[in-house]
Amino acid sequence: MAAIVVGGWIFFRIAEKQPILPWKEKKHTNVQLNTNSKNNNKKKKKHEVEIEQEPNIFEELFSDVRDITTHMIRYHDNSFTMIAEVDPVNYFLRSQDEQEAIDITVESWTATLNFPVGIYLQNRFIDVSEPIELMAKAMKDSDDLNEAALSYGQAMIDDILTWQRDTPRYETKRYLIFTHKIKAADITADSEEELDKKIMEKAFAELMRRLSSARNQLRKADITVNLLPTEGIYELLYYTFNRRKALKHRFKDLVDQEKNALYITAEQSDDRIELVKEAIEQHEAEMERKRETTTERETA
């Protein structure tokens, strides 16, 4: 009977999910309750992205670029890139001997390379606006052209514009890219400004040496290699990201508009703004001294 009673007690306590021994208290866990029942039914998302947040794709693309100056692209890790524009030779119009000479020259140059050299090809829409402007100006300035000649010239300009508009034509620009990294630890300087200047000079000297070597060797094959200046680098990037827009809004026109603008539209640093203010104050002070000197002379 005692065993039956004990077994029944154990079965009852287990069924009630209570401890078998009465003096043992049931452990309770603290659970935080959320008053918003709708949020409880929704699963928490792994990645929460704000709707109004827009990705800065263009800024992120050039996040490693520090500046474009002194005909070079400078990166934050003191790597520098110099770009050279290549005017190629028409290989297939040359004779067999000339083609072999070109091959030997190019192979000899590539065999001497002990540093990386990149090749970049860019397809652009052919821009005939400058030749058309020169033709229109020549027609306007010429006094000895009769009506037939003027009519023929204007018809030719219209035909060129129609040809460009109906069938887009492309031209290929060819570039050589030279890259070099400067180790700042190997350069001794007394200040940060001096160190930065020495890094720029050393990078420019090394990259210019590589470009000059390519220019001198490829010249034998009638291939012209010219340094792309700072403005040319900006133009190259402009055509890269504005392929169709660059045909109507030319980079040259944008530069001219910026030069003739009353205010600079590009973002300027605080240091540059302060330098401009100081230059204006110095100019005004100098002009005031000249006025005073002129007044004193007139009075005397």
Image (spheres, rainbow, N blue to C red):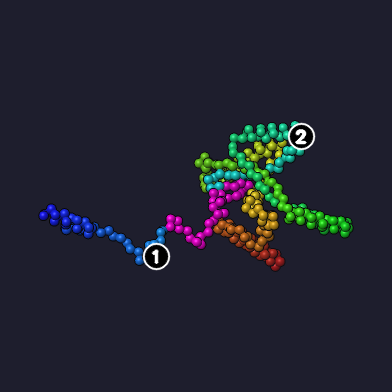
Image quadrant where residue 110 sits = top right
Q: Residues within 10 Å of mark 2 (few under 14, many from 20)?
A: few
- Indicate the position of residue 149 as horizontal and vertical percent values: 86, 56
Q: How many marks?
A: 2
Viewer-side residue, 22 vs 211? 22
- x 69%, y 64%: residue: 294
Residue 147 in view (yes/no)? yes
- x 35%, y 66%: residue: 35
Q: CA distance from mark 1 to mark 2?
A: 82 Å
With respect to residue 114, does 172 lie above or below? below
Q: Residue furthest left?
A: 1
- For the residue labelled by badge 2, is the local secondary structure a helix, a strand or a loop? loop
Viewer-side residue, 18 vs 185? 18
- Indicate the position of residue 147 as horizontal and vertical percent values: 87, 59
With respect to residue 76, does 25 lie above or below? below
Judging by the rendered image, the residue that carries numbered circle 2 is 95
With respect to residue 142, does 193 lie above or below? above
Find the magenta span and give its range. Answer: 45-74
Viewer-side residue, 194 vs 55? 55
- Indicate the position of residue 159 as horizontal and vertical percent values: 79, 55
Judging by the rendered image, the residue that carries numbered circle 1 is 38
- x 13%, y 56%: residue: 5
The quadrant of the rendering that contains the C terminus is bottom right
Q: Residues within 10 Å of mark 1 (few under 14, many from 20)?
A: few
Viewer-side residue, 296 vs 213? 213
Q: Which mark is residue 24?
A: none
As drawn, is 16 to the left or to the right of 195?
Answer: left
As drawn, is 191 to the left or to the right of 22?
Answer: right
Q: Amino acid at mark 1?
A: Lys
Task: Give yes or no for residue 178 being in the magenta stretch.
Answer: no
Q: Amino acid at mark 2?
A: Ser
Tell me which numbered mark, 1 or 2, is placed earlier along the sequence: 1
